[in-house]
Amino acid sequence: MIRLIITLVLALYLTVTAAGPADGNGKKMVFNILDLGIPVDCNFDGAPDLSLDIVGWIQGKAFDGDGNRNLELTVFHLDGIYTNATGEMWTWRDRGPDRLYFIDDEAGPQLVIAISGRAGLNIIGRIVVNLITGETIFEAGRHPFGGELFEFTPDDAACEILS
């Protein structure tokens, strides 16, 4: 769900373009992210300690048609490049597809998102979340830095590495 929110926020800053990956003869939307700069405050003193530049692209394909349970497939190819005051850099890579679709259960049709690749910021694998109830339906993968799902952000890792 966090990735979906991030995608929506990033989409506000972007324009639809034909550059980047193929647009599927106009059947896919491609959003290029060209150096979206964000300040990062590691010690919460109000002054930025790092600069985060996000570059890459997001490609989305919406599915329509009667009876189609798939709503959207979104593919991410993003690099978060963190830089400190001395010019040292560290890159956080986000790659993988997200799939938005419906499933049936005893409560009726449920909207779910399946995130694959680097999911939930701290798992490399797959997670499926029911967007109606907020329940995690499925989780598989490994936590490259340890900890629980959503326990830290890439900003936390960058602050530790570059400070």
Image (cartoon, rainbow, N blue to C red):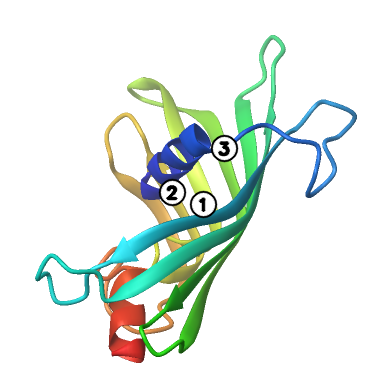
Q: What numbered label is drawn on residue 73? A: none
Q: Which residue is mark 3?
A: 14
Vertical placement of 161 versus 50: above or below? below
Q: Quadrant of residue 162?
A: bottom left
- Element at badge 1? strand
Q: CA distance from mark 1 to mark 3?
A: 22 Å
Q: Earlier in the sequence, mark 1 or mark 2?
A: 2
Residue bearing mark 1: 115
Residue 161 locus on image (x, y percent): 35, 90
Quick one: SS at disc 2? helix
Please identify, in this view, whether the residue under mark 3 or under mark 2 is nearer the observer: 3
What amino acid is at disc 1?
A: Ile
At label 1, counting other C-alpha atoms closer than 10 Å, the crowd grade (few under 14, some 14-19, many 20 or more) is many
Give the residue drawn at x 45%, y 58%: 37
Residue 11, x across and y down, in percent: 52, 36
Q: Residue at 29% x, 87% y: name it.
A: 160
Q: In the visual, does 69 lie left or right of 27? A: left
- Image quarter where the N terminus lies is top left
Real-space Cα separation, disc 3 to disc 2, in angstroms = 16 Å
Q: Residues within 10 Å of mark 2 (few under 14, many from 20)?
A: some
**Left or right, residue 81 beside residue 5:** right
Reply above or below: 154 against 100.
below
**Badge 3 amino acid:** Leu
Give the residue at x 38% y 70%.
Answer: 51
Residue behind mark 2: 3
At which x and y percent is residue 39?
32, 63
The answer to whether residue 69 is above or below residue 74 is above
136 left or right, relative to 90: left
- Residues at badges 1 and 2 in contact (C-beta under 8 Å)? yes
Contact between labelled residues 3 and 1, with CB atoms less than 8 Å apart: no
- The disc, 3 or 2, on the residue closer to the chain's N-terminal end is 2
Mark 1 to mark 2 CA distance (whole Å)? 8 Å
